[in-house]
Image (spheres, grey):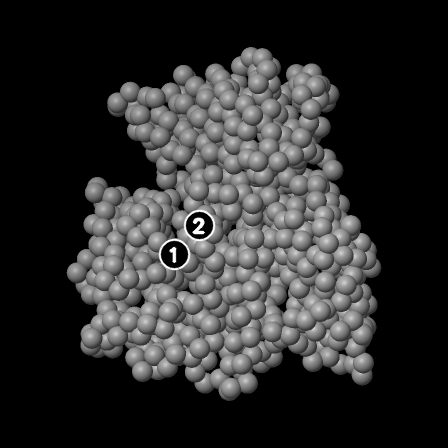
Amino acid sequence: MSADHTVLRGGGVALVLAHRDHGLPAVLHWGADLPDAAAADLALLRDTPVANNALDEPWDLTVLPTSGDGWLGTPGIALHRAGGAAAPRWVATVTGGGGRATVRAEAVDSEAVVELVLALDEHGVLTTSTSVTSTADAGTAPLEVAALRTLLPLPARAEEVLDLSGRWVRERTPQRRLVADGTWLRTGRRGRTGHDATLLMTAGTTGFGFRHGEVWSVHAAWSGHHEHLVERLPEGAGAHAAVIGAGEALESGEVRLGPGETWTSPDVVAVWSDAGLDGLTARLVRHQRAGADYRAGRPRPLVLNTWEAVYFETDLGHLQRLADTAASIGVERFVLDDGWFGSRRDDTRGLGDWQVSDEVWPDGLGPLVEHVKGLGMEFGLWFEPEMLNLDSDVVRAHPEWVLGPAAGPTPPSRHQHVLDLANPDAFDHVLAAMSDVIGTYGVDFVKWDHNRDLHEAVRTDATGTDRPAVAAQTRATYRLLDALRERFPALEIESCSSGGARVDLGVLARTDRVWTSDCNDALERVAIQRWTGLLVPPERMGTHVGPPRAHTTHRDLDLSLRMLVALGGHAGLEWDISTCSPQELDALRAWSGLYRELRPLLHTGDVMRSDHPDPSLVVGGVVAADRSAAALTVVRVVSGRGVTPGAVPLPGLDPARRYRVRVRPEAGLPESQQVRGPRWFEQAQGDDGILVAGAVLDDHGLPVPALAPGQGYLLHLTSVDGA
């Protein structure tokens, strides 16, 4: 840190803050690393031209920009006291350097203190956290926080923006547009992340793709209301041309601070890369794998979840036969889904009564748990701790625990309502009930579901006043997750929310994986997993082999494709495999062996997604960090422009090495539409494979068989010489 600027560095990225005589520091640069002299030059050259009908003096984009600084776009911070004291004058200090800086600013006129922490790690991931404290005396009107956002500058060359949308069973659908004057704002007000959540808001140079282009991206690490935006003002110039940002979306009156009270925003994660979207993903995946909350070193066990196998029909004999079959093909974790508790025989009743049903389990869950663990598998169990059916014992005893306004219950969704976890009594009840079941039966894994959006998410306080409750509910959920992990340190938890409606780094800081989508149609999953993988490492995405006919699309797909696509994450099955033929069981047994063999590569490598010009072909997978090996899939999702799609380059390999290329039949082989396939494809199915130079694989690639839609194959590459 110099007298006039601070530089944060990490992973080839730099953030430059300019100190100012008054007000908050300015953000001069966020992007590629700069030498010290260049950072100093930025501070000297920060003045921009003064245009007609603009402020008389050049202005800076500060770390929390407002109109008082010159920024007339979406503000970084908005505060007031009963409508007054809304224009704070900050006096700031900056401490730190290297990879971390703290900005502390006080506004005496608004009786407020802001502290902004910026941390740039060794992977180039910038994390920001902002807190506001009221310094007023007793009797003063509360300090109301209307907005607290992270906004970072975008250069003029960031001309395109990519974000994601979606719906139930079609999460993570990309949408792309030009950066234009005005605001592209994606606000989620579902009380959870949402099927339509963008995950990452990304701006980049024209035509950026997975493997090329310069990109800037932000993510709100938060499971409640949130927003992501890209904004450009027509009068902007230079560093002020546009911003990209994210933060919590607060309801009116949601944050009202009394004397000495502090509000801390969720973290916002920001990433820059000059290597396209895969460059962003590489930084984000390494950041997560290095995190204190990440359980490194333990292989992700092969899962069987019972939902699409039995639904609510939880018959002990059937489940024991299913467990026997699962163990015989190499399954390592058996998860009992919904219907094991209270009066829960369908989805209209019993939700919230977390006691084992005497009706279905007269001897408790012990006989099933003992059978599963006796076969050498872990035992997992489904909960939905944040939800209730009105037809439940817990609501009959405590109707005041249902989240909603004083006027009456909110509209039901999936026959369920929300438990007010911010109510200490409700929180303690759920924690005790879950702890009792988990402790009694030695539960190894919890599938944690959240099956509805939050409508009218308000709670009635002691005065009978309805107050916004999404932030309180989200923080209470985090506390519940934290408390269970503290009580049961070895317990693993999956975040499921009608499939993939709660996927964010806030919940992933407290869970081990996410259920990527309720859609187990492998053809749909190709795109869903590809785009979820922008943010989520493969080992944290649940990817299951479903039944021959997909539950959500009613489409029939070959077992080969279903197995192939499920290898793209934390693999498992969701299918009554006790009904499988001997041939299907043999195929699944070989596939599960392949998963265990390749798991160290699949779950530690760098994600690679090819920018193939033919949209009918989807190519991607992982490459080892040292580029010694790779596991890549080639899938044809629709009919292409031609019968033969040509050659597919395989980027990410070391051009100086030679690789043994094998097509692994254990992942399933396609049924092609050709008289004779490419000779290499047949040869590569043997144990010896074929030897090809990395430079050839990267530049020219491998000719693709004439695949039918819904067909694909797995390439396993290993280096045969040193670096």
- In the image, 506: left or right of 631? left
Task: Decide: few, some or many residues near mark 1? Use Cα within 10 Å; few <14, some 14-19, many ≥20.
Answer: some
Q: Which residue is mark 1?
A: 492
- Using the rendered view, name the quadrant where residue 170 is placed: bottom right
Q: Position of residue 498 (x, y in %)?
A: 44, 63
Assign a secondary structure to mark 2.
loop
- Above-or-below relation of 45 to 231: above
237 left or right of 505 in image = right
Looking at the image, the residue that sits furthest to the bottom is 581
Q: Nearer the viewer, mark 1 or mark 2?
A: 2
Q: Earlier in the sequence, mark 1 or mark 2?
A: 2
Q: Amino acid at mark 1?
A: Glu
Residue 43, given in percent of the width and then of the height, sits at 66, 18
Q: Nearer the viewer, residue 407 or 339?
A: 339
Check if mark 1's residue and mark 2's residue have beta carbons within 8 Å. yes
Q: Residue at x 51, y 62 (%)?
A: 570
Q: Which mark is residue 249?
A: none
Q: Type of residue at label 2?
A: Arg
Residue 690: name its quadrant.
Answer: bottom right
Which is nearer the eye, 14 or 654? 654
Q: Nearer the viewer, residue 678 or 17?
A: 678
Q: Is residue 658 visible?
A: yes
Residue furthest left in the image? 397
The relative height of residue 705 versus residue 165 in the rendered view (above or below) is below
In the displayed structure, 678 sits above or below 163; it is below
Residue, disc 2:
295
Q: Secondary structure at mark 1?
A: strand
